[in-house]
Image (cartoon, helix red, strand yellow):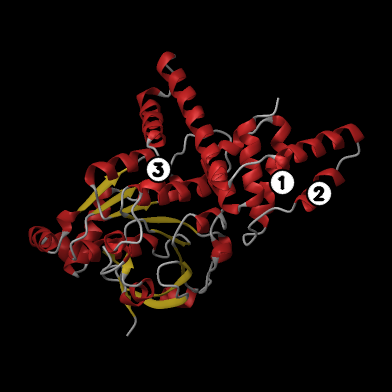
Amino acid sequence: MTDVSHVSILNGAMRSREVWEEYYASGENLLAPEDLQPIDKYIADFYLADPKAQCVDRGLMEAVLLGTLRDPKRKEQIKQQIDVVVQSSVSLPNAKAAVRALRERRVRETLATKLLIPSKDGPAEVARLMDEFIGLSVPADMDKDVQWEPGVMKDALGPATVPVFPRSLGERLRGGLRPGHHMIVFARPEIGKTALALTITAMAASRGAKVLYCTNEDAVRDLMLRGLVLFNRKPFEWVEANMDEAIHTARKYGADRIRFHDMAPGSLTEISRLTRKLKPDLVVIDQLRNIRTGLKGETLTQKLDSLAMDARNIAKQNACAVLSLTQAGDSARDKAILDDGDVDNSNTGISAGCSVLIGIGATQVMRDAGERRLCLIKNKLGGKHGYADVSLDPMTLAYRDRV
């Protein structure tokens, strides 16, 4: 028997890319009933193949799905399923609510099983499910929100809570990041993703912002050492020889506002829990692709799409900004100008899950000269695209505007 909730969701997903993105990011598409899977897969393939598409045409879907079948009986079954989905009467808000209801049911049932039957997953998996259940249990009552008043607009106006440097980049973002913003930076290995994240972190902390830096890449002590170099603007050798002075100077300029957290590889539930506890202005996730999701059978593309959406939700739910790092694919090798097609394994969900998407490009000549190009591929904050040409200081590994 067809699942009414999935029928409603697929109806909404056909009419709205936004509904499909919520559905796809939730992971519930992996649990679609067997009789709906051909329709589910077609909708996903359609949106993934055309990032600009906003809805799915029924006629085209029928032509593709029915055109591959020779069995008349199977054709009639698929056509009937398409009729059921298309004729389902559901508003787009209710389709989104159906996604939430499915997710709540899955989490509730899985949590109950884990609590009743001990498994090898242990308390960490139970804690993750409990956090997800609590988060889903919070009612999303938009009708009571006060809108169109000056106080509501304060987070979107005035100075950025997280100033972004180098200045040539920050100016294109109206100064920097504000609560609810999610910025994703991608680049090839050894190009300088972490260097940019640390530059933004140190400058933001020096101007009063609290930062939670979560890493599953470099060791925390290594990042702290690089932080000392940044705050002191001295080479590593000087910091090593003058450690007490270096720490004193770093703390003077805001190092105590930075909290590094080591993960192996960590989960967004873990990051969300720390965010609620520490209430930072900025959360850095270094790197997004290493984060554990707990969903079985997902591809790396599905994983990255889901993580990008959930990282954005952390920013929105905790009134903070989030900066995530991920890899560029091989297509970005020795390129100065990058686009969303250069993101490794995800050129749709990654872009959909952020307010700002930046690719760090460099040819071999630029790398040898210490030059980088920060390509603004998506910019909902300032609207300006293009790129900022900057330098990566070989002494401090800090990004600076080119003079």
| Residue assigned mark 1 | 42
Instruction: Report the number of numbered marks.
Output: 3
Disc nearest the viewer among 2 and 3:
3
For marks 2 and 3, give the CA distance.
40 Å
**Which element is circle 2 on?**
helix
> For the residue labelled by badge 1, is the local secondary structure a helix, a strand or a loop?
helix
Q: Nearer the viewer, residue 389 or 146?
A: 146
Is residue 25 depicted above or below 188 in this figure? Answer: above
**Quick one: label 2 or label 1, which is nearer the N terminus?**
1
Q: Residue at x 46, y 18 (%)?
A: 113
Category of crowding for the residue at label 2, using alpha-carbon neighbours closer than 10 angstroms: few (below 14), some (14–19), many (at least 20): few
Q: Residue furthest bottom?
A: 403
Q: Counting other residues with Cα less than 10 Å from the Cα at mark 1, is it few (<14), some (14-19), or many (20 or more)?
A: some
| Cβ atoms under marks 2 and 1 closer than 8 Å | yes
Pointers 1 and 3 in contact (C-beta within 8 Å)? no
The residue where tag 3 is placed is 141
| Three-letter code, disc 3 | Asp
Q: Is residue 29 left or right of residue 322?
A: right
Give me the disc on residue 83: none
Mark with earlier residue (2, 3):
2
